[in-house]
Image: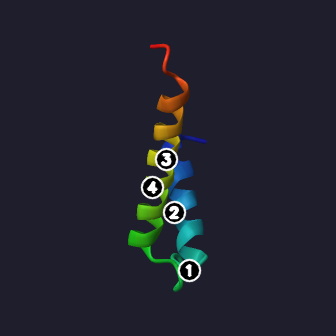
Amino acid sequence: MSLHTTAAHLVTLAEAEGGNHESLNPALTGGGALAVLLLLLWITTRFNRDR
């Protein structure tokens, strides 16, 4: 199975499942993920003061 064939099957499967859920706001989800990643970055830099 090639990468192109696998990708085509996954796209077909995703479209069959209905796509986005009505209660999920992409901007809120992305903003929340960004906030969590920035928090983890800040925590990592606080614990890594020896550099």
Q: Are marks 4 and 1 in contact (CB under 8 Å)?
A: no
Disc 3: which residue: 39
**Which residue type carries mark 4?**
Ala
Q: Is residue 48 above or below residue 14?
A: above
Q: Are marks 3 and 4 in contact (CB under 8 Å)?
A: yes
The residue closer to the viewer here, 28 or 14, is 28
Nearer the observer: mark 2 or 3; the answer is 3
Question: Which secondary structure lies at badge 4?
Answer: helix
Mark 1 is surrounded, within 10 Å at the Cα level, by few (under 14), some (14 to 19) or many (20 or more) other residues, namely few
Which residue is drawn at the image coordinates 43% and 54% (left, top)? 34
**Which residue type carries mark 3?**
Leu
Among numbered discs 3 and 1, the one appearing first in the sequence? 1
Disc 4: which residue: 35
Mark 2 vs mark 1, CA separation in Å: 11 Å
Q: Do the residues labelled 4 and 2 touch (CB within 8 Å)?
A: no
Task: Estimate the x, y position of residue 2 in percent, counting from the top left.
Answer: 54, 40
Disc 1: which residue: 18
Among numbered discs 4 and 2, the one appearing first in the sequence? 2
44 to the left or right of 26 = right
Disc 2: which residue: 11
Among numbered discs 4 and 1, the one appearing first in the sequence? 1
Q: In this view, does 16 lie above or below 40?
A: below
Among numbered discs 2 and 3, the one appearing first in the sequence? 2
Question: Which secondary structure lies at badge 1?
Answer: loop
The residue closer to the viewer here, 39 or 37, is 39
Task: Estimate the x, y position of residue 13 in percent, counting from the top left.
Answer: 60, 67
